């Protein structure tokens, strides 16, 4: 048989190439989507600027620290939560609905490659968010602690890494079990509830009697871990353990319940 | 594996959804390098059968082998070798047509040139259009491009021309013929008999989850017991005309009135039937303007076997 335009030459690309392609595609789609950008950048910036301005006007301190120094780590935590949980849940829910996961399921990209691609895309978007928010925070006068920079850096990496894992596992849990519309509604609702009452932006200690409960929430644990490292150069081991526990529980449940179609 | 072995072997496949049986002991083979059509009405079990070949569904009974592999156990080895066109969807709503195609290309080792595919499938005008804003026909053409871009040995195309205008349909048929010419095996489902007759080397007609007839288009339509007669007359038929004509023609005849002046008659393929129709016209004072004996179609084959229309 002569070699024609369509003569078969089957074969998958290397796993690394497939994962990179998948992560580039997903990150691009996430950044192109107006609602996702609103969640990822606009809302955190509004919360940060609004919070700092309001605190300045009424002249309150938070635990004896300047408002901007406490709110900026909290808003960084909020940004991680918005992308890892809400954006991942909504995007994955609609990928199931539109048959994207089904089509990719017939491509050479294996399921673990799809997950790796998602995680990489997610980390890229989170990194971009953190850069923007750090710049905004610094412009508002944020002074992170310089008591022990290596420990602070380690604390940030651990908190962002474990926080991303915990929220992404929970986002996938919702997206893999519910219909796309229900996922959209629930992911946004949970985001709003946790932003307001979950100890992300404001320290758990400001919630009075609810403090103990809030420290066990992934939102509270992430917020506390970020504040501990960026305000006091302290690694909040118990908060990191709470995040790790949520990540493990979320992953196990997702692996059991996720429906690809 | 020798290249002469079949591309697909399905043996006694059974699939149920709850207590509804979707596929009921279906068996068929697909020869390498052929275009094979799985023809049947909606709900016959076509898509379910394809989805077990593509590894989406686990057979509940029977066996499925694709390119000699088990679509479940040998999934990782099989998937790079096949292309799949879904009946609908398959792309991110915000992804641009060309972007989606390039993404699928990036997942393969030796993909086709995407700009060539874009041109061949007439997607040039909508290459930068997000998927959600493509027309139905454009989505179908993109779906076919996505199935082909990895240079598969075997493609499964589910209703490839549904929603296409006649021009796009013709282009798609030409493309499918060309890829068969280049050595790609094509399995397509359709409920359009003309599509199956035009494209397929071999047709499996399925109904209610089993194969009820198999053969080449000419084997299936050759000879046979029946023919379709089309009758058009000069003025409206009297009331009760179909019933009266059926009574005159005797058992084994179907008469369907299309409008005031035309009828389709399925009946024995012999001169007697034609003679009886013209005598009936004379007796009822209508003048035949068209009285043609049509070639037996797959529609007739389906009607003969099942007593029902293929597409209504």
Image: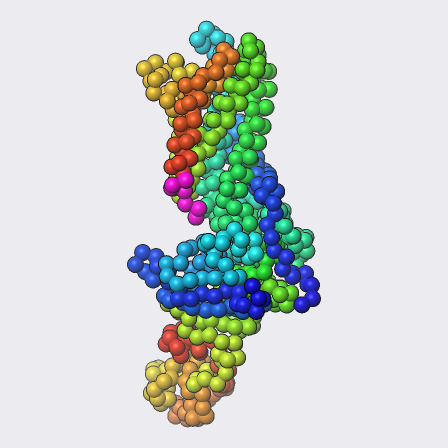
* Residue that appears at 57% across and 66% down: B2
Q: Position of residue B152 (x, y in %)?
A: 59, 58
Front in this rendered view, residue A243 or A204: A243
Residue A187 to residue A15: above or below: above
* Residue that appears at 65% across and 52% down: B110
Extreme-left residue of the structure: B19
Residue A127 to residue B222: above or below: above
The answer to which quarter of the image holds residue B56 is bottom left
Magenta stretch in the rendered image: A255-261
* Residue that appears at 65% across and 54% down: B112
Residue B100 to residue B285: above or below: above
Q: Is residue A57 visible?
A: no
A85 sits left or right of B103 in the view? left
Q: Is residue B267 visible?
A: yes
* Residue that appears at 46% across and 6% down: A64
Q: Is residue A91 magenta?
A: no
Front in this rendered view, residue B197 or A20: A20
Q: Position of residue B14 (x, y in %)?
A: 37, 62
Front in this rendered view, residue A125 or A156: A156
The answer to which quarter of the image holds residue B283 is bottom left
Front in this rendered view, residue A204 or B66: B66
Q: Position of residue A59 (x, y in %)?
A: 47, 7
């Amino acid at each position: 048989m002569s070699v024609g335009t369509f003569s078969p030459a089957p074969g998958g690309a290397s796993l690394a190439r497939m994962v990179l392609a998948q992560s580039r595609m997903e990150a691009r789609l996430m950044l192109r989507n107006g609602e996702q950008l609103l969640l990822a950048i606009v809302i955190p910036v509004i919360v940060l600027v609004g919070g700092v301005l309001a605190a300045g006007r009424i002249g309150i301190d938070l635990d004896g620290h300047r408002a901007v120094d406490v709110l900026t780590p909290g808003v960084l935590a909020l940004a991680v939560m918005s992308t890892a949980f809400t954006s991942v849940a909504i995007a994955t829910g609609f990928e199931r609905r539109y048959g994207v996961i089904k089509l990719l399921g017939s491509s050479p990209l294996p399921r673990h490659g799809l997950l790796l691609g998602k995680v990489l895309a997610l980390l890229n978007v989170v990194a971009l968010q953190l850069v923007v928010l750090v710049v905004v925070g610094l412009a508002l006068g944020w002074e992170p602690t310089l008591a022990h920079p290596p420990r602070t850096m380690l604390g940030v990496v651990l908190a962002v890494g474990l926080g991303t894992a915990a929220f992404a596992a929970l986002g996938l849990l919702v997206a893999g079990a519910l219909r796309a519309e229900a996922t959209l509604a629930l992911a946004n609702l949970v985001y709003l509830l946790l932003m307001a009452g979950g100890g992300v932006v404001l320290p758990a200690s400001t919630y009075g009697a609810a403090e103990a409960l809030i420290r066990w929430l992934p939102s509270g644990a992430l917020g506390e871990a970020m504040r501990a490292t960026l305000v006091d150069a302290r690694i909040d081991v118990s908060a990191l353990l709470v995040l790790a526990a949520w990540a493990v529980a979320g992953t196990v449940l997702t692996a059991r319940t996720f429906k690809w179609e | 594996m020798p290249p002469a072995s079949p591309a697909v072997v399905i043996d006694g496949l059974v699939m149920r959804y709850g207590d509804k049986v979707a596929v009921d002991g279906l068996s068929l083979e697909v020869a390498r390098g052929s275009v094979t059509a799985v023809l049947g009405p909606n709900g016959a079990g076509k898509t379910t059968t394809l989805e077990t070949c593509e590894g989406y569904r686990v057979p509940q009974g029977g066996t499925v082998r694709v390119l000699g592999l088990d679509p479940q156990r040998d999934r990782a080895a099989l998937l790079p070798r096949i292309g799949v066109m879904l009946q609908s969807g398959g792309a991110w709503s915000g992804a641009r047509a060309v972007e989606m195609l390039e993404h699928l290309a990036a997942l393969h080792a030796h993909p086709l040139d995407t700009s060539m595919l874009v041109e061949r499938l007439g997607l040039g005008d909508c290459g930068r259009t997000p998927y959600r804003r493509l027309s139905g026909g454009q989505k179908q053409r993109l779906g076919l491009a996505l199935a082909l871009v990895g240079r598969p040995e075997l493609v499964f195309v589910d209703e490839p021309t549904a929603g296409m205008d006649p021009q796009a349909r013709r282009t798609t048929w030409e493309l499918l013929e060309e890829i068969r010419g280049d050595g790609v095996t094509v399995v397509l489902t359709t409920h359009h008999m003309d599509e199956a007759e035009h494209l397929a080397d071999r047709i499996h007609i399925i109904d209610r989850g089993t194969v009820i007839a198999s053969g080449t288009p000419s084997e299936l339509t050759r000879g046979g017991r029946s023919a379709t007669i089309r009758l058009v007359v000069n003025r409206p038929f009297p009331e009760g005309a179909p019933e009266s004509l059926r009574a005159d023609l005797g058992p084994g005849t179907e008469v369907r009135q299309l409008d005031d002046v035309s009828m389709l008659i399925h009946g024995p393929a012999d001169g007697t039937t034609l003679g009886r129709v013209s005598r009936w016209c004379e007796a009822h004072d209508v003048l035949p303007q068209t009285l043609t004996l049509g070639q037996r179609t797959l529609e007739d084959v389906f009607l003969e076997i099942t007593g029902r229309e293929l597409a209504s």
